[in-house]
């Protein structure tokens, strides 16, 4: 893989955002992280919780969906409008389904067939529909996802659109962004840096649904990083929509202004959907402004045996960084900025900007009625710039990733029983360059160049071994080569102090082979009651920021993290009532983690996550629906100096209770959710001797409606104005000393729009 020291000769007009590095308090014992390892609608009406599917229908030849899902598409347009059937993935290069989403297997239905796709058999899967996203009382996309069972979130900025917020499946705390895999239309978007993919750059109007699959099992289909689970964002396609334009505008607290437009059109076999979104906000805190724009386009040509699709997207984000608020009871006089100046800033000059573009071109073709070939490739690029430490550190980075992911789906009997196979090859190639200097406009002290190339082959199959039983198994083998080097300019400002110069990192160029596997089952014990279980292995390689670290000299060398997990549970359905409860147990070796006290990334001693996730929903009547979930997560060290201690930033208890009420059909609707997050250990508190981040409860409500071509909504978030923070980093030495990132109190958002 080529690695170059040459500068990019041109900067695109969409230049970008540097991975936000952990900041450091002026009094050394505490690290002020601008990023915590540098967030399912209170989804009402209720989400189907892996409940039984009706009889499966064969997928139309023109439908292309994600590997994880095969939710029935909207009815195709009539010939008179020239539309085709909707692609489940809305283009974007989705793969065709794997096993069972939301009714994951034939066992749930007892019809003797294999599910058309969906979550992986034996895994806990949730689907958040478009209607649930639109009606959610939660403020941001990350909030919607974080209100699902087994999901937590961490926000440093309290931004209006959830900018910079990370979501965490099954308790990884500061490294959540590297252990939760984000997909858009079935394609992985986790970048080869700590900053990762920012969900706030995806406009809610462009989303068709969200699929959440918990645990290691998706590593077979998607590889590196699918440890805690996978979140798949499926965007909309014009093929399932009438020719229309939807325009919406809104305003809210802290000078927030938002506007969006979505247009869809079809002509014969061609269809196109274009959406754009803009948002501006002054932010809750000083130096907390946000300006963001994004756009998505889906173009599709459908023919008798398949479709050709092109999905492109771009985003531009400017975010000011307010930094942390210091609490130090040992100071003279004692300091408590969280209580007395929670909206202030210690970093009035800091900011982080980023811009990105991505595109996917693909073909879906039915080789035979039961054999589908999908060939697609993608390219994405991200530019990042950040000014940190009040102007004394500047980061200018560029990351490009190219991918090719051909695969085949075979749905035909094998050994006399129903069978579904998905098998393919994934090729990814990432190229990274980052200039690190002592200020904006000066020569960089360090220039980091790196590349990550991987080639993987995978196979996954579901067999309906009995009319009431599905068994799924699969494996993946992945070759990775990683190369990186550091070039130091000792003549650059800030490179040397008192004759001591920063050392140059040791070059790194290594390759390795990793593997993942999955074995799962679902068995219908009696009508309405299903037993599910699975076991799996996954892996995660260190990203480039983790290899660079913040200490000197850089060695780039970290061991690959591995995880083995298992889970088992029951799913019950009676009429309109559904409940599922699962127990999971995950054991990790060489977990990769940033030590804020030593400013280095390390492989931790063995750790463990285990817990119970319970999800329930009940349609009380045609106009009233209830939903809730409760999760217990025990994340702890298994061995070493901290054996038995809790892993920082993981709340043992989280829960949500919500309702959806159609007061006057769709003309007046009300949605509400009560959200609880228990206390958790602060980042860097491996010894578990510091105060915990306090528990908090918030209430979100939304009133809205649709009248003819017009729609409106008014939402209040954190109705009772609770003061809380969900991220803090503690001193490794001074008891009670920490830096926290306060979140907004009560906020509101009012929106209105029209469709024609």
Image (cartoon, rainbow, N blue to C red):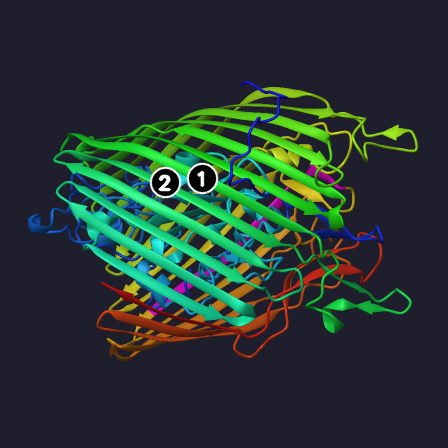
Q: Which disc number belongs to residue 430?
A: none
Kindly state the secondary structure of the residue where label 1 is placed.
strand
Going 43% across and 41% down the picture, which residue do you hit? 217
For disc 2, the marked residue is 312
- Quadrant of the rendered structure where residue 723 is? bottom right
Q: Position of residue 134 (x, y in %)?
A: 35, 64
Q: Which disc number belongs to residue 357?
A: 1
- Quadrant of the rendered structure where residue 300 is? top left
Viewer-closest of 619 and 614: 619
Q: Is residue 106 visible to us here?
A: yes
Going 51% across and 60% down the picture, which residue do you hit? 280
**Looking at this rendering, what residue extends furthest in the bottom direction?**
663
Main secondary structure along the magenta-highlighted residues: strand
Please give the range of residues in magenta: 599-617
Going 33% across and 40% down the picture, which residue do you hit? 311
Viewer-closest of 429 and 116: 429
Q: Residues within 10 Å of mark 2 (few under 14, many from 20)?
A: many
Does 47 sit above or below residue 2?
A: below
């Amino acid at each position: 893989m080529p690695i170059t020291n040459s500068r990019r000769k041109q900067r695109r007009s969409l230049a970008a955002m540097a991975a936000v590095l952990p900041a450091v308090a002026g009094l050394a014992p505490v690290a002020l992280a601008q990023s915590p390892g540098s967030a399912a609608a209170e989804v009402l009406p209720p989400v189907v919780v892996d409940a039984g599917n009706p009889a499966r229908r064969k997928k139309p030849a023109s439908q292309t969906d994600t590997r994880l899902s095969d939710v029935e598409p909207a009815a195709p347009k009539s010939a008179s409008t020239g539309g085709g059937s909707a692609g489940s993935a809305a283009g974007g290069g989705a793969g065709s389904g794997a096993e069972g989403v939301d009714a994951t297997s034939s066992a749930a239905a007892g019809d003797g067939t294999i599910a058309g796709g969906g979550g992986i058999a034996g895994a806990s899967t949730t689907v958040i529909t478009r209607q649930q996203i639109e009606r959610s009382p939660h403020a941001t996309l990350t909030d919607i996802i974080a209100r699902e069972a087994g999901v937590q979130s961490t926000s440093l900025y309290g931004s209006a659109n959830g900018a910079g917020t990370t979501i965490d499946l099954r308790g990884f705390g500061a490294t959540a962004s590297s252990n939760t895999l984000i997909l858009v239309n079935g394609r992985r978007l986790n970048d080869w840096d700590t900053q990762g993919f920012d969900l706030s750059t995806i406009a809610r109007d462009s989303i068709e649904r969200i699929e959440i699959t918990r645990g290691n099992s998706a590593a077979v289909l998607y590889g590196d990083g699918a440890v805690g689970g996978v979140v798949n964002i499926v965007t909309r396609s014009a093929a399932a929509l009438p020719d229309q334009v939807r325009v919406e505008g809104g305003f809210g607290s802290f000078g927030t202004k938002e506007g969006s437009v979505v247009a869809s059109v079809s002509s014969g076999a061609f269809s196109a959907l274009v959406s754009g979104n803009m948002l501006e906000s002054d932010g809750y805190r000083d130096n907390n402004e946000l300006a963001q724009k994004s756009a998505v386009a889906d173009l599709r040509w459908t023919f008798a045996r398949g479709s050709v699709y092109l999905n492109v997207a771009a985003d531009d984000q400017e975010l000011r960084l307010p930094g942390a608020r210091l609490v130090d009871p040992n100071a003279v006089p004692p300091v408590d900025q969280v209580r007395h100046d929670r909206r202030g800033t210690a970093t009035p000059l800091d900011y982080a900007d980023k811009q990105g573009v991505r595109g996917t071109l693909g073909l879906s073709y039915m080789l035979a009625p039961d054999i589908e070939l999908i060939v697609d490739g993608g390219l994405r690029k991200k530019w990042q710039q950040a000014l940190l430490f009040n102007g004394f550190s500047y980061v200018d980075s560029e990351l490009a990733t190219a991918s090719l992911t051909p695969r085949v789906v075979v749905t035909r009997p094998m050994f006399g029983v129903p069978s579904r196979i998905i098998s393919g090859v994934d090729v990814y190639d990432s190229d990274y360059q980052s200039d690190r200097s002592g200020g904006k406009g000066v020569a960089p002290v360090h220039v980091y160049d790196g590349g990550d190339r991987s080639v993987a082959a995978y196979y996954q199959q579901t067999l309906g071994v009995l009319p009431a039983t599905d068994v799924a198994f699969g494996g993946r083998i992945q070759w990775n080569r990683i190369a990186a080097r550091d070039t130091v300019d000792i003549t650059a400002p800030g490179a040397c102090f008192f004759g001591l110069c920063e050392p140059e990192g040791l070059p790194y160029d290594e390759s390795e082979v990793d593997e993942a596997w999955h074995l799962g089952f679902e068995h219908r014990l009696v009508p309405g009651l299903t037993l599910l279980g699975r076991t799996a292995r996954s892996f995660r390689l260190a990203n480039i920021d983790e290899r660079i670290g913040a200490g000197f000299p850089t060695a780039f060398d970290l061991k690959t993290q591995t995880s083995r997990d298992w889970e088992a549970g029951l799913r019950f359905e009676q009429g309109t009532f559904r409940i599922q409860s699962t127990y999971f147990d995950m054991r990790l070796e060489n977990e990769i983690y940033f030590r804020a006290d030593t400013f280095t990334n390390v492989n931790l001693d063995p750790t463990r996550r285990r817990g119970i996730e319970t999800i329930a929903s009940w349609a009380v009547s045609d106009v009233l629906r209830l939903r809730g979930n409760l999760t217990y997560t025990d994340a702890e060290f298994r061995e070493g100096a901290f054996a038995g201690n809790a892993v920082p930033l993981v709340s043992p208890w989280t829960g949500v209770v919500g309702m959806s009420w159609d007061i006057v059909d769709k003309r007046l609707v009300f949605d509400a959710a009560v959200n609880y997050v228990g206390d958790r250990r602060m980042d860097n508190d491996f010894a578990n001797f510091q105060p915990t981040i306090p528990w908090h409860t918030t209430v979100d409500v939304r009133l809205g409606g649709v009248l003819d071509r017009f729609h409106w909504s008014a939402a209040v978030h954190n109705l009772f104005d609770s003061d809380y923070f969900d991220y803090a980093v503690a001193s490794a030495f001074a008891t009670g000393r920490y830096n926290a990132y306060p979140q907004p109190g009560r906020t509101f958002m009012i929106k209105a729009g029209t469709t024609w």
